[in-house]
Image: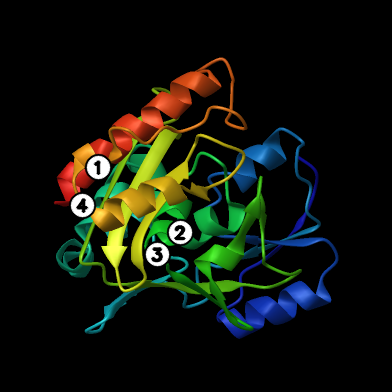
Amino acid sequence: MTPFDYQRPSSAADAVRTHAAAADARYLAGGQSLLPAMKQGLAAPGTLIDLARAGLAGITRTADHLTIGAMTRHAVVADSPEVRSACPALAALAEGIGDPAVRSRGTIGGSVALNDPAACWPAAVLALGATVHTDRRRIAADDFFKGLFETALEAGELIAALQFPLPRRAAYLKFPQPASRFALVGVCVAQGPAGVRVAVTGAGPGVLRVPAFEAALAAQWAPTALEDVAVEAEGLNTDLHASAAYRAHLVGVLARRAVALAA
């Protein structure tokens, strides 16, 4: 690990100002991905800006939305009575991330900002049609995720919170890689203000929607509606854990199970 400057601002505004004034700065949320990358020499920021005291954690609920601060830990989301009541799918998703140590340190904002192709949170953000609130603007989920580890965030832009419309029903299921607990495939299905949306993580180079599933479920919300809807393996990931064909099969299996769970 190369030497770096460490800053711990006391507000989000101070964090943004610190980033603007520093050379080669990176925000530090839970550090579950950034710190291992630094140890392996894959990342070498000149300045780390720790967001732990920036006032970005917390959960609030209104009649129509659930808002989760970017620095809210996975474990807090999993245990939150507000989340369990408003959208149980989000609590279940958070409870299935990593292990207790990862859930106690990792944050929702850090996961969304990194956009790991096998992370769980991007699937929920996309399927529920959430809005990403930053220090500069609001970004719709459909416009936020751009590809492999790529998002719409500009240099120095800081995620402040994620705002989820409350769905009529939703569920998330994943087939986890046994060691990392990342998703070989994860599927989030939701029926809410924006209609029926289905998002898949782990299968391709980034989180993606499945329009054929959405159309079938809009006509009939039932697992049987997806029985004759095929997922093409072309463009999906093949690695030592699973082939593209296997992942395509898992998308269908998990989607049907998630629909049954949500119903």
Query: Mark 4 highlights which residue?
Result: 221
Give yes or no for contact between labels 1 and 4 (Cβ–Cβ under 8 Å).
yes
Residue plotted at (16% across, 43% down): 260
Q: Quadrant of residue 167?
A: bottom left
Q: Nearer the viewer, mark 4 or mark 2?
A: 4
Residue plotted at (47% across, 78% down): 55
Amino acid, disc 2? Leu
Q: Which mark is first along the chain, 3 or 4?
A: 3
- How far separated are the C-alphas under marks 2 and 3? 19 Å
Give yes or no for contact between labels 4 and 3 (Cβ–Cβ under 8 Å).
no
Amino acid, disc 1? Ala
> Where is 192 relative to 200, above or below?
below
Query: Mark 2 highlights which residue?
Result: 126
Is residue 78 among what the camera can see?
Answer: no
Image x and y of residue 47, in percent: 76, 61
Q: Which mark is first along the chain, 3 or 2?
A: 3
Query: Mark 1 highlights which residue?
Result: 225
Secondary element type, mark 1: helix
- How far separated are the C-alphas under marks 2 and 1? 21 Å
Secondary element type, mark 2: helix
- How far separated are the C-alphas under marks 4 and 2? 19 Å
Amino acid, disc 4? Trp
Farthest right residue in view: 23
